[in-house]
Amino acid sequence: MTGTRGSILMLSLHGYVAAKPELGMPDTGGQVTFVIELARRFARLGYQVDVVTRQFEGQRAIERLNDGSRILRIPFGGREFIRKEDMHDHLTEFVSNFLLSKRTTRDYDVVNSHYWDAGWAGQRIAEELGIPHVHTPHSLGKWKRTDMRSIKDQDPEADDGYRFDERIQREFLIYRSCDHLIATSYQQAEILRESYDMREQQITMIPPGIDESRFTPIPSEDMRKVRRRLKFRQHDVYAVGRAATNKGYDLLIESLPALREIVPDARIQLAVGANSPADERLIADWQTRAKALGVEDQVIWRNYIPDEKMPDYYRAAAVFALCSRYEPFGMTAIEAMACGTPTVVTTNGGLREMLNFGTQALYADPTNPREFAAILGMPIRYPELAAKLSSEGSRFARRQFGWTGIAKRTAEIFEHFRGAYTQPEDAVLSAV
């Protein structure tokens, strides 16, 4: 397999990386979707692409994505699942196994790593192969630790096991060593400058993308049929994601009594899957909280939603809620907006700064239940606002976050550094 424009090595080590990822599985969500969709678009642009990840639980060694791109799985760390917080202990083994593997093409032009675990490994691989390394953090340890401290005030064990000190130290070295950083929001870029001492010239902001052919609005008559089929009511609020404290589903539940003062028949549809006993305990705590607030019958619990069904779940909702305490970006919100669903996002995330309040979406502080409830209720109470958010939000999401455009902007960065590495050494020094 030979790409006409060159060869890209993409690294994404944790979670269940697959051509059709099981979203909602441990450590498997927006980042996995991001990497897979980007790889497919790079291939369509003429590149040869290998997405390299961890092999465990009997997964296939090689999986095809499309013409020009594939997933390569390298075994390390044993045969069982390893959560991303514990990848620290196995990265040296991965680098060694990768460099010795016969599965890889070994003629890559650039390394593009995702999240700090792959970034640490990607820097060593790039140095070994003598090629540039462009890193996408997705999440920042310093940012997450700050937000987790507020959670710890309510739950003293909330940040146990995150190993923030070790992670942040490695992040700093990755960012200082790689050729360039791609931030997924302006807020993330600002934190890279202020908290990690990165220069503005070392960072480019490129947001995640969406599949424009899947996430689309539908006529109101079809939407009513979708609601009946999925058992959504006219004023249901929808949220979807992993069972994690930082996702803020408890905060959304706490806003429901105030929302029902504004919209008496409002309910919440929560699509939150449980993949472990810890997840089940967390959901049980949220259900207990709903009962204590007297809204247990108005919270509808849904499990894992297959990826192919996600667009209709977005369309069925009166409002989509991104209620995270901490959210580097928020792909689900963009997908909901693209489907024409009025969307309320958290003030504690990077997406807010890209939106015009009241035109493309709304935002509120999810830690303030009455504020969040008031904002959730606005598009339900005022149909003209809902119509504006639906049309303008969909137009904004589809124009700004289509995957092909995102891939082209990212590939331009690769080409810039690829050219620098292929110049004579004295030319590179003079350019610096």
Image (cartoon, grey):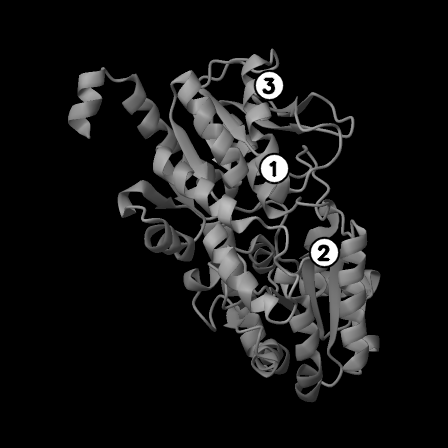
Residue at left 68%, top 63%?
239
Residue 391 in picture, x, y percent from top left? 53, 64
Disc 3 secondary structure class: helix
Find residue 303 and report its image quarter: bottom right
Q: Amino acid at mark 1?
A: Met
Residue 87 location, x and y as percent? 61, 37
Q: Relative to residue 215, is residue 167 drawn left or right?
A: left
Q: Crowdedness of circle 3 by 10 Å Cα count: few (<14), some, many (20+)? A: some
| Mark drawn on residue 87 | 1
Identify the residue at image location x=38%, y=30%: 414
Foreground: 90 or 338?
90
* Of the image marks 1 and 2, the number of the one nearer the N terminus: 1
Assess disc 1: are there few (<14), some (14-19) or many (≥20) residues with their C-alpha within 10 Å of its C-alpha. some
Q: How many marks?
A: 3
Sequence-wise first label, 2 or 3: 3
The three-letter amino acid code for the residue at tag 3 is Asn
Kind of residue at badge 2: Asp
- Mark closer to the observer (2, 3): 3
Q: Secondary structure at mark 2?
A: helix
Residue 312 disc label: 2
The residue labelled by disc 3 is: 97
Mark closest to the chain's N terminus, 3 or 1: 1
